[in-house]
Amino acid sequence: MENLVSFVRIPKNASTTIYQVLGVANTIRDGELTRFFQGNHLRYKGIFAPSHCSYVEAVRELGTVVSDVPSFAVIRNPYDRMVSMFCFAKKHQLFGLYGSSELSFVEFARAICARHEEDPHFFHAFPQSFYIDGVQTLLPFETLVSAFQDFLRANGIMGVSPRLPQLNSTSHGHYSDFYNEECRLLVESVWGEDIERFGYSF
């Protein structure tokens, strides 16, 4: 199992970029999770990648090929992550998933909060903490380039490019520019667990 890793894809945490860079070195691949994808149709709604599963789910589905190699995930400031999710939904016209054809940022945050309360399968409202139980290494999004290089080096992973292109990203200003008091409180009501666990602040 030399040169294999288990990458846990948390949505909007550079997951597409790292997934593509790792390629077949990653044990948690879409093609290996067809049964899981079909059995969790309420979560994935037929369009999202099945590799957006938790580490525990990946181990349960795929076994020791996942648990016997180094594992990692990327964590991100929840306030920043909410802005990234909003800009992604706007760019790809996904507001229909949130109940409208057009949403302002505060309306989007309200919709995430509502889905969090109403739909246990709405995985875009899942906290990052849901994904990472059992994961060995957490890389901060804010220093991802160097953290990813350090992870590869520390685990002797060869044949994987240490360079991370920007894939599936959106262009926007600093996350704080999007916020008023209501938006901040909405993020804290949905993802307060992450804020406390990872030590983030606004």
Image (spheres, rainbow, N blue to C red):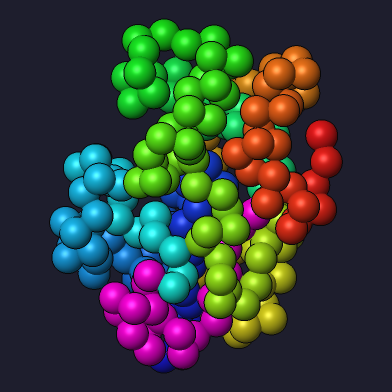
Q: Number of numbered discs present?
A: 0
- Camera-side residue of 171 and 138: 138
- Camera-side residue of 161 and 36: 36
Which segment did they paint magenta? Answer: 57-75
Q: In this view, does 79 lie above or below 16?
A: above
Residue at the spot 68% in from the left edge and 51% down from the top edge: 193
Q: Can residue 145 be seen in this view?
A: no
**Where does the image place residue 170, in percent across and percent down from the top left?**
54, 28
**Where does the image place residue 196, in percent across and percent down from the top left?**
77, 52
Q: Can residue 119 be seen in this view?
A: yes
Q: In this view, does 158 lie above or below 18?
A: below
Q: In this view, does 116 lie above or below 64?
A: above
Splitting the image into 4 quarters, where does residue 174 fall? top right
Residue at the spot 82% in from the left edge and 34% down from the top edge: 202
Q: Does the magenta stretch include residue 101?
A: no
- Camera-side residue of 55 and 172: 55
Residue at the spot 65% in from the left edge and 36% down from the top edge: 189
Quadrant in which the N terminus is drawn:
bottom left
Residue at the spot 30% in from the left edge and 56% down from the top edge: 50
Q: Is residue 132 above or below residue 94?
A: below
Q: Does the magenta stretch include residue 66?
A: yes
- Camera-side residue of 166 and 102: 102
**Where does the image place residue 112, in percent across and percent down from the top left?**
50, 30
Would you say 196 lies left or right of 130 here?
right
Outermost front residue: 118
**Where does the image place residue 88, in percent across and percent down from the top left?**
47, 27
